[in-house]
Amino acid sequence: MGLGAAQSVQNAGKSGQISIVSVDGIQAALQAVKAGTLSGTVSQYPYAEGQLAVQACMKAVAKQAIPPRVVAPRAMPMIESGRVAVVGSINIDHVVRTNRFPAPGETVLGNEVSVGVGGKGANQAVAAALSGAQVSMFARVGCDAEGELALRRLAERGVDTSGVLAVPEVATGTAWITVTSSDNTIVVVPGGNARWDQAPGADRFAEVLGTAAVTVTQLEVPMDVIERAAASAGGTFILNAAPARELAQPVLSNCDVLVVNEHELRVVTGNRSDSVEQAHAALIRRGVGAVVTTLGAAGAVFTDVHGTETLAAFPAEVVDTTGAGDAFTGALAARLAVQASLAEAVRWGTAAGSLAVRRAGAQESLPDLTDVRFLLEGEAPR
């Protein structure tokens, strides 16, 4: 809606006269246009209704009559917001798009290249913020321009970055991503993500994690950081076991929700012959509270104390799968932070993942709360 509001103002050449604040349940305030003599506050309405609201404000400035109703009846109520702490990686993503992956020793031509902010931790933090959560990020970057760019972009998306510290004489992490029309491969160079013990300063780690409703982490940071996060978490502890590796028993025992894809599930269990349901049961026996496995176009399957359930995916025309898993985990965390059931949270995650694959990029593809709710309620996202 903030974009619709800003566009209306720009189209009318009034950018210096009106200030619009949009909350949409995502951020405490998103200032779309700075200024002047009139301040209008519009919240929790989609793009088109934002345009209508601003047009009404502009007519007031011009002393024109205001229509008696400017907000469409499909506007949605404000959604509650929970606190999520994300402990994870921040990378600069270098993305190459091509028609197919090269075979070993082969060179293929790419179609385009782009550079953006990523890392599973950063992506999930943004996804949770866009899904309505109040998000605090804990990470390490280098003392370089890339680290400054990453912090700026996260702050712009409503993520608290006071827990992100810069490591001297180390580069910010990088990811090298190759994307085809149906899949992607990623090589990560950790940089600052691997140097948690070398960052000067204090990050209030235990204090924030102890009071957050949900703590989320991944496997792109050192294992001792993950163990510390699990021990410090005062609420639900979610581990997204990516990149895949086998996990020690103490980590599994502290895991309230384990999120994996099918490949990661096989690696974590060390058994490639079990079905998804059998692998889930094995992890539950090892002390994991609940297991969620994403199945791509087939949806997701989850197991908790109530049993195993499969949720179908939402149909989507796939453009780029890079951000789908992080969109899923961020939305899942945001819903669990407001005490939603695991089934509801997985449904939200599935919707967010479906929307993410329809757009190119990692963070650029992440959907906001309005789009997810429209999809869940059967309306076309904007």
Image (tube, rainbow, N blue to C red):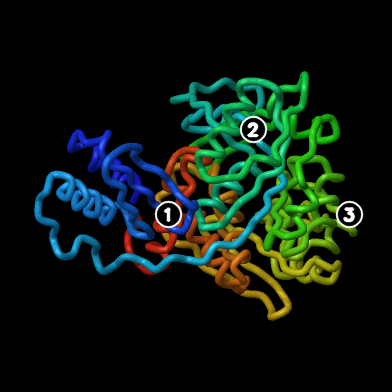
- How packed mark 1 is, by other alpha carbons closer than 10 Å (few <14, some 14-19, many 20 or more), is some
Residue type beneath disc 1 = Val
**Image position, residue 329 (x, y; %):** 61, 55
Question: Between residues 137 and 34, which one lies in front from this camera angle?
Answer: 34
Q: Secondary structure at mark 2?
A: strand
- C-alpha span from label 2 to label 3: 26 Å
Indicate which label's residue lies in the foreground, 3 or 1: 1
**Image position, residue 259 (x, y; %):** 68, 58
Residue 47 is left or right of residue 87, and the answer is left
Q: How many marks?
A: 3
Residue at x 69%, y 51% (from the top left corner) = 263
Disc 3 and disc 1 in contact, CB within 8 angstroms: no
Residue type beneath disc 2 = Asn
Disc 2 and disc 1 in contact, CB within 8 angstroms: no
Residue at x 42%, y 59% (from the top left corner) = 315
Question: Between residues 280 and 104, which one lies in front from this camera angle?
Answer: 280
Residue 310 sits above or below residue 133 on the image: below
Indicate which label's residue lies in the foreground, 2 or 3: 2
Residue picked out by circle 3: 248
- Of labels 2 and 1, earlier in sequence is 1
- How packed mark 3 is, by other alpha carbons closer than 10 Å (few <14, some 14-19, many 20 or more), is few
**Image position, residue 277 (x, y; %):** 70, 70
Residue 332 sits above or below residue 159 on the image: below
- Of labels 2 and 3, earlier in sequence is 2
Q: Secondary structure at mark 3?
A: loop
- How packed mark 2 is, by other alpha carbons closer than 10 Å (few <14, some 14-19, many 20 or more), is many
Question: Residue at the bottom extreme?
Answer: 306
Residue type beneath disc 3 = Ala
**Label placed on residue 91:** 2
**Image position, residue 1 (x, y; %):** 34, 51
Residue at x 74%, y 29% (from the top left corner) = 192
Residue picked out by circle 1: 23
